[in-house]
Image (cartoon, rainbow, N blue to C red):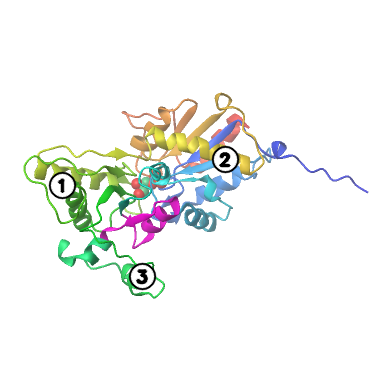
Amino acid sequence: ARKVHHPKAEEQWHTKTAIAFDIDGVLLRGGHVLPEGKRALRMLNGENPKKKKVPHVFITNGGGVTEDKRAADLSKKFGVNILPSQIVQSHTPMKSLVDKYKDQLVLVVGGEGLACREVAKEYGFTKVAVPDDIAHWNSTVWPFRKLHPDYIKEKDSAETEAIAYDFMTEPIAAVLVFHDSRDWGFDMQIIIDVLTSRGGYIGTAQEGDIKQAVPLYFSNPDVIWSTDFPIPRYGQGALRIATGALFKHTTGKDMEYTLFGKPYSTTYAWAETTLENYAKAQGVTLPPREERKVYAIGDNPASDIKGALAQDRWEPILVKTGIAKENDPEYPAPYVMNHVEDAIKFILDKEL
Ligand code: G3P
Ligand code: MG
């Protein structure tokens, strides 16, 4: 009988190089798949001259769904198996806040319907309010707000875990902006209400010298991002600027906040660990960090390129399918390519 050779994981993988993909403007635009992205991912899954797989992760300043859902959606769109353990979304590193706010009420802002509450609960936050909880509690808080249809469905459902925070007796301990706001006026009003309240109690207001009542966190600093529209669109960073301007107008002070997401090092530290855990789950041991290189492919100079330039052993590649049509003078990428397929071909040629 013929002897069957079962290759060890090490023989199937090239482990000295890893790839970190940005999503919007690199693999997707306005939710649509870029065909070059499809081919690029297939190449990393072994469809290359050396028939080797290359470890890769996805680092996006987008979010609004759990990593499980994001992985399932990407797998379907790109026709390759993408695991939740390969995904770092804008709010993924906010898991590090769970211990701090474990038993306290946090306000999670942004995203569609109740999706971000679900994400925060999955991360381990136990008491998670969304702005619609406040509008439901007292509709005059923002007279123009119509509760999201998903919210109405949930609150009217028999199985609902009662969403009945009494904001008069239960203070909000922190505001966490998880994703792009769907209703800027309403969300800004609520955020500033909490920040200028007495101790996080909605409906109370400080007088005189106002001190920011609770910490504020943003998951994504991007002022602009790339969609199907011909020119970039405002993102979560723009909401932050607008909210900060209103806060300053109201209090005379600068709004204080902590940022997560690219280009901040918390996100890259998270990405390195994600890469190692993901490799381990595939049965592959990566060489020590000093011996491997990570190529970061992105479209946003201020996040993807700036962020990767600041990391040891990370090399950014700017692609022209998103925000930037040429290299950026402030955050110049060492390589500029037309699209992600060219970037992957270049990397494989050089490294495999
Ligand atoms: O809201 C998403 C956006 O700001 C950027 O997403 O994948 O390009 O980091 P991405
Ligand atoms: Mg992008």
Asked if the residue at label 3 sits under 8 Å from ligand 1, the reply is no
Q: Helix or strand or loop: what does disc 1 sit on?
A: loop
Q: Is residue 207 above or below residue 350?
A: below
Q: Position of residue 215 (x, y in %)?
A: 26, 42
Q: Is residue 118 above or below residue 84?
A: below
Q: Which residue is mark 1?
A: 196
Q: Which residue is mark 3?
A: 154
Membership of 127 in magenta stretch:
yes
CA gap, disc 2 to disc 1? 41 Å
- Magenta stretch bounds: 109-132
Q: Are marks 3 and 1 in contact (CB under 8 Å)?
A: no
Q: Residue furthest left?
A: 208
Q: Is residue 17 above or below residue 126?
A: above
Mark 2 or 1: the one toward you: 1
Residue density around tag 1, few if under 14, some if 14–19, many if 20 or more, within 10 Å: many
Q: Which residue is mark 2?
A: 277
- Rendered-image quadrant of the C terminus: top right
The answer to whether 248 appears left or right of 290 in the picture is left
Q: Give the residue type at disc 2.
A: Asn
For the residue pair 185 and 1, the one nearer the viewer reads as 185
CA gap, disc 2 to disc 3? 36 Å
Image point (11%, 47%), residue name: 206
